[in-house]
Image: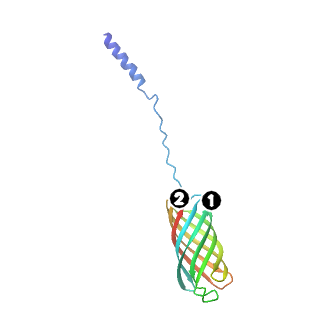
Amino acid sequence: MKKLLTTILSLAAISTFAGDYGKAVIDCKAPVIQPCYLAGELQVDLFGSANIESGDESYGGGVGINYFITQYIGIGASWNLIDLDGQLGSSSDTELHDTSVDLIFRMPLGEESCTAIHGMVGGGVISNGSNHGTYNVGLGLEHRFDAFGVFAEGRQTWIDSADVDFTSIRLGARFVF
C-alpha cells in the first residue's frame, strides 16, 4: 500500500509540473515587404532610341544616370545620339549629340507594385559643330526585377534657336544601385 501511495503522489507531482510553464511565446508578424522603388537610388540606363522629326525616322541610342532624392522625385542626365538629316543649318549636322538634364516624377502603381509610371521635364544642349539649347517633356513606364529594370518612354524635344522639334521613343535597361 505504501508503494501505491508513493506512486500516486509521484504521478500527481509530475503532472503538476507538466503544464505550460516556461514555454516560449512565438510572435507571428507579417513579413515586411520592401518596396521596389526607394529614396536614395542611383540608376544607370542603357537604351536604344527611335527619333522622329517631320515624319522622318532615325535610330540611335544612349546612356543615362538618375538619382532619386525621395521615392517619388529624382534628377537625371542622359545622352542620346540622333540623326536629324541636316535640319539644324548644314548638311554636316546629321549625327547630333542630345544631352539633357531632367527633373523626374515617379509614381509606383500600388504599394507593393514593381511597376511605375514616370514623367520628366528638362532641358539641355544638342550639338555637333554648333550648339542649340533644348527643352523637353516626356512620360514613361518602368518595371523592376530586383536591382534590374526595363523601361519605355517617349519625350518631345524642342530646339530653341531652330524651327525643329522631334520625338524620341526610348527602350532600355535600368540598373539600380
- Identified at 62% across, 75% down, the residue is 99
**Disc number for residue 125:** none
What residue is pinned by disc 2? Answer: 36
Mark 1 secondary-structure assignment = loop
Residue 158, image quadrant: bottom right
Please state the horizontal and vertical placement of residue 19, each as a whole percent of the image.
42, 27
Looking at the rendering, in which quadrant would you find the C terminus? Answer: bottom right
- Identified at 63% across, 89% down, the residue is 90
| Between 74 and 60, the one nearer to me in the picture | 60
* 55 in relation to 117, above or below: below
Three-letter residue code for mark 1: Thr
Looking at the rendering, in which quadrant would you find the N terminus? Answer: top left
Residue 5, image quadrant: top left
* 30 in relation to 9, above or below: below
Mark 2 secondary-structure assignment = loop
Question: Which class describes the residues within 10 Å of circle 2: few (<14), some (14-19), or many (20+)?
Answer: some
Please state the horizontal and vertical placement of residue 27, each as a whole percent of the image.
49, 40
In the picture as drawn, the residue positioned furthest to the right comes out as 161
Three-letter residue code for mark 2: Cys
Q: CA distance from mark 1 to mark 2?
A: 13 Å
What residue is pinned by disc 1? Answer: 70
